[in-house]
């Protein structure tokens, strides 16, 4: 139909540049980061594809159903099918690698609970992982308590990392006695001593793994947790002490597993290959000494390509899941064959890669703070400028200068910007003293933004090698602010803390070209409450191209790849709690192709207040006292007082976000 609206005189180039959903996929890099789970429908809606077996689910429909059920946004949607999909992908990748390289042993994945502790997530992983013998990894006492109760099957592997006190050691030893496949991983030498002591006291034959401090570090943002400087792991001299002690006690067969962890989000696959080789050398030496080590555990670190650039930025990784598996299996096979030792069981503790994709945070844009430009004005400004105040005429002069000048020097651009800033100040002062009408002041505002944009157009056209900061930041200055009902700190902690980028995509309307430059801000009053960089194919990642929300209303944005580390780190910042949450399964028998299995209300105001020691009961009593005094003094009527207290009371059970 769109073609019919073109007049016959319209230039053919209009056809060639017509916007399509494929352009939208490219703009937001969707193909590159979605691992095949997200895409666009022909109508421009973002869809989820859990498996090939079920048709894609339109995320906007889930949001609409959530709203019909009376829940408010923001909402965290968990697509449970994606978790199962990732578990399968990981295990199949290793199976393929084992097959390809003729590896003579198996792969056993364990899921590190800390990455997303939510019970449903852990259950889903164990469920989907059953056919692959997936196990779990715990790193604290609380996680041990949660994890150990999930070892229905004796074979399910449970690894316990992190520092362990005697109560934890006793619990782990007791589980071993029950016949469970449980291994404490020794991080510090004194843990080794205590495990021997406790098992001796309890009369249990111990089994354990040892975390080795490898030379190799993981590179990238998270690398500190591996390498020489790592606070975790046993050094090689201490390892030899350990062996001597075990030999003396006749317990060498307690030593079952070698573990290392380079840190999360390994950005360079070569680092991993080197670490695996290093570990296999140690393994071979142990085997030759008669220590029957059975497992090599390569830790976590399987990364997620958050921006889909295959390692071109700090948020990406330079390998696929299959390459990761190939690198481990091939390095282990080559090194073990060279050393003439049997191939060990390979274990990985992949958390981020299993969970990141499954959850999407949906927020609504509540309003925008758009910049006003001269061209948006219908009235004849020529006459207003001619009749107007000098300052307005001056500004218009600067505007025309910047509009018409060709190839200006950065110094000229800077001068124009400074002049515009000075004139804008002058406009405000003159208005303050009553010398300027409201209309002229508004015109001054438009002129200011139009000058800024004219300057910015030159920068974009000429792309100078070097720019003074003020000019460099113009882009940001010109972007529209899109206010969203969420908290960056609460919901995208790693963006707030370390600048990790997450893909953000409008959930619908992508058959129409988005052309507002937007910067997302949250409702906290922090200067940090802002999304500072975006996943986009635009050269400048300080803004995101979005639609005009007056024409696209309501406007929902999805924050993707939020399932690892982000969505469980609830905190009391600004007393925003956890957002509401729903768990979605795809189902072709349902009208929209999905059903919501579970909705979890977000944190209520009263729960949030209790974190900081305000209690509903006490607050209600205080409020009652205030209201009663006002009723007594005749400031309000009794009925009004009762209504007010009722409304106040309702706050406690309401969501911390806007209703
Ligand atoms: C955090 C952690 C993991 C998980 O790492 P991912 O990169 O999320 O897979 C695995 N093992 C240990 C010891 C960890 O501390």
Image (spheres, rainbow, N blue to C red):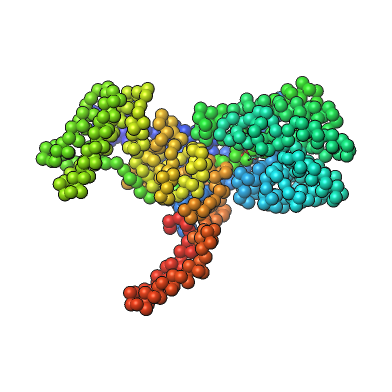
What percent of the width, then of the height, locates residue 517?
A: 36, 37
Does the image show residue 607?
Answer: no
Residue in the image at 54% along x and 58% along y = 611
Does the image show residue 394?
Answer: yes
Q: Taking 424 as reference, is 94 left or right?
A: right
What percent of the width, then of the height, locates residue 396?
A: 18, 35
What percent of the width, then of the height, locates residue 47?
A: 49, 42
Compared to 556, does 210 lie above or below?
above
Q: Taking 574 as reference, is 251 left or right?
A: right
Q: Taking 309 as reference, is 516 left or right?
A: left
Q: Quadrant of the N terminus?
A: top left
Compared to 517, does 78 lie above or below?
below
Give the farthest residue toward the top. 338
Compared to 345, does 158 lie above or below?
below
Residue in the image at 63% along x and 45% along y = 114
Residue in the image at 49% along x and 60% along y = 605
461 and 545: which one is in front?
461
* Count of numbered tags: 0
Q: Taking 271 as reference, is 649 left or right?
A: left
250 and 121: which one is in front?
250
Q: Quadrant of the C terminus?
A: bottom left
What percent of the width, then of the height, locates residue 545?
A: 38, 37
Ligand 1 quadrant in view: top right
Residue in the image at 35% along x and 28% along y = 468
């Amino acid at each position: 139909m769109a073609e019919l609206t073109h007049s016959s005189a319209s230039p053919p180039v209009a056809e060639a540049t017509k916007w399509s959903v494929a352009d939208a996929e490219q703009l937001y890099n969707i193909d590159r980061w979605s691992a095949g789970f997200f895409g666009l429908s022909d109508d421009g809606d973002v869809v989820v594809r859990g498996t090939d077996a079920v048709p894609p689910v339109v995320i906007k429909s889930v949001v609409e159903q959530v709203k019909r059920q009376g829940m408010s946004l923001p909402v965290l949607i968990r697509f449970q099918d994606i978790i199962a999909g990732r578990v399968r992908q990981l295990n199949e990748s290793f199976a393929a690698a084992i097959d390809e390289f003729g590896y003579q042993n198996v792969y056993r994945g364990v899921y590190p609970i800390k990455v997303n502790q939510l019970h449903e997530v852990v259950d889903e992983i164990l469920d989907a992982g059953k056919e692959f013998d997936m196990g779990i990894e715990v790193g604290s006492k609380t996680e041990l308590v949660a994890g150990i109760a999930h070892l229905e099957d004796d074979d399910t592997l449970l690894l316990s990392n992190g520092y362990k006190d005697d109560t934890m050691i006793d619990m782990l030893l007791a589980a071993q006695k029950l016949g469970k496949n449980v291994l404490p991983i020794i991080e510090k030498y004194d843990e080794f001593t205590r495990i021997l002591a406790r098992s001796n006291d309890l009369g249990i034959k111990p089994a354990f793994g040892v975390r080795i401090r490898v030379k190799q570090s993981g590179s990238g943002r998270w690398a500190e947790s591996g390498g020489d400087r790592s606070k975790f792991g046993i050094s090689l001299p201490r390892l030899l002490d350990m062996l001597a002690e075990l030999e003396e006690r006749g317990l060498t067969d307690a030593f079952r597993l070698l573990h290392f962890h380079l840190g999360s989000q390994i950005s360079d696959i070569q680092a991993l290959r080197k670490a695996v080789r290093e570990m296999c050398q140690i393994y071979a030496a142990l085997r030759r000494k008669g220590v029957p080590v059975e497992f090599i555990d390569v830790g976590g670190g399987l990364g997620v390509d958050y921006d889909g650039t295959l390692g071109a930025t700090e948020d990406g990784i330079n390998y696929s899941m299959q390459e990761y598996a190939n690198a481990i299996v091939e390095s282990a096979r080559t090194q073990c064959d060279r050393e003439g030792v049997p191939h060990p069981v390979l274990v990985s503790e992949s958390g981020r890669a299993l969970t990141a994709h499954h959850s999407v945070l949906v927020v609504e844009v509540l309003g925008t703070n758009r910049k006003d430009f001269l061209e948006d004005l219908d009235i004849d400004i020529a006459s207003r400028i001619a009749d107007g105040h000098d300052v307005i005429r001056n500004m218009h002069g600067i505007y025309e200068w910047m509009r018409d000048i060709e190839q200006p020097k950065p110094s000229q651009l800077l001068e124009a910007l400074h002049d515009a800033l000075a004139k804008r100040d002058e406009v405000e002062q003159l208005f303050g003293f009553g010398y300027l009408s409201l209309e002229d002041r508004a015109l001054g505002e438009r002129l200011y933004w139009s000058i800024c944009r004219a300057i910015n157009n030159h920068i974009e056209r000429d792309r100078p090698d070097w720019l003074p900061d003020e000019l460099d930041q113009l882009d940001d200055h010109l972007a529209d602010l899109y206010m969203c009902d969420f908290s960056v700190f609460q919901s995208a902690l790693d963006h707030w803390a370390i600048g990790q980028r997450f893909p953000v995509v409008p959930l619908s309307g992508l058959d129409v070209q988005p052309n507002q430059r937007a910067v997302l801000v949250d409702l906290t009053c922090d200067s940090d409450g802002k999304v500072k960089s975006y996943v986009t194919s635009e050269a400048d990642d300080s803004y995101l191209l979005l639609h005009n929300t007056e024409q696209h209303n309501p406007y929902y944005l999805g924050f993707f790849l939020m399932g690892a580390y982000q969505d469980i780190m609830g905190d009391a910042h600004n007393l925003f709690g956890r957002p509401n949450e729903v768990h979605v399964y795809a189902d072709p028998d349902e009208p929209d192709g999905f059903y919501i299995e579970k909705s979890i209300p977000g944190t209520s105001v009263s729960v949030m207040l209790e974190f900081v020691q305000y209690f509903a009961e006490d607050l209600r009593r205080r409020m009652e006292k205030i209201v009663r005094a006002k009723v007594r003094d005749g400031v309000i009527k009794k009925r009004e007082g009762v209504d007010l207290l009722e409304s106040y009371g309702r706050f406690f059970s309401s969501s911390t976000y806007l209703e």
